[in-house]
Image (spheres, grey):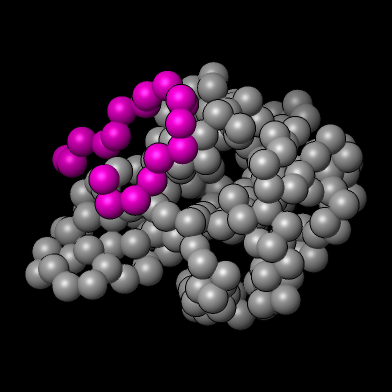
Amino acid sequence: MPKLLEYKELRERVWGQAEAIEHPDGGTVWLRPPESSEIPVLRDLLHTEITPGAGTLDTMTKVFAHNRDSFWLIEQLSLSGGAPSVIGFYSFLPLNAEGRAALEAHTLNTIDPPLSLLAPFGEAPAALYIWAIVARRLMRRLMPSIARAMGLLYADAPIFARVATEDGRKAGIGTGFSASAGAPEIQLGSLIQLPPWSKGGALA
């Protein structure tokens, strides 16, 4: 089994091909920030890999403009070389204190989130909500990479997600999530939580 990146102290933001790990099907993968012109590519991946009803280009564009750390591309370089291709992404809602309170009260509109509830770029969030991930066979492998890419500004934010599918429920359990708000177990529809990256969330 390919060795995963070991956890390192979150001293700086690092990403790109120098941080590449092996893809289970061959080649290498890494993370990088997208350009604004690439948000439609991510929207297309979201609609192809998850559901055509997930997210709109307008919503994704406005969230990215508010905080560009909301999106991170996954690029792959195949064994045959050539140009790397975009094969997936991570996306987050970096919530401020009011946004976190709304999430935990189940009143946050995660389909079209108000920008007033999101921390702007350069501001430490009160929580990170996993908005969407397209990362077939790579989610756990790239968790240390995403933590290092986002760096110290995000290191102390607890990480939340909502379970939408059975595959998502299994992935959440496998990645170390626990049910939030004292619920006894993770079910479809559950709000689930990881510790902050500074405390080893998904990195052990």
Residue 103 x/y as whole percent:
81, 44
Residue 143 visible in the picture: no
Give the number of marks. 0
Q: Which residue does the image show at 10% across and 69% down from the upper left?
A: 80
The image shows residue 172, relative to residue 134, as above or below, that is above
Location of residue 185 (image quadrant): top right
Give the magenta-colored segment's residue range: 1-18
- The image quadrant where one finds the N terminus is top left
Nearer to the camera, 97 or 109: 97
Q: Quadrant of residue 148?
A: top left
Decide if residue 26 is on the left or right side of residue 98.
left
Which residue is found at the position 56% from the left and 34% from the top? 177
Horizontal side of residue 168 vs 189, given as left or right: left
Q: Is residue 4 magenta?
A: yes
Q: In this view of the protein, can residue 41 be seen by the observer? A: yes
Q: Is residue 165 magenta?
A: no
- The secondary structure that most of the magenta stretch takes on is loop
Position in image of residue 78 (x %, y %):
18, 66
User: Which residue is depicted at the point 46% across and 37% down?
Assistant: 13
Q: Is residue 108 left or right of residue 184?
A: right
Q: Quadrant of the C terminus?
A: top left
Depth order, front residue of 47/98 = 98
Indicate whether 59 appears above or below 99: below
Q: Residue furthest left?
A: 80
Q: Find residue 145 and report its horizontal and vertical position in percent.
A: 39, 41
Tell me if 53 is positioned left or right of 9 in this view. right
Q: Position of residue 28 (x, y in %)?
A: 22, 55
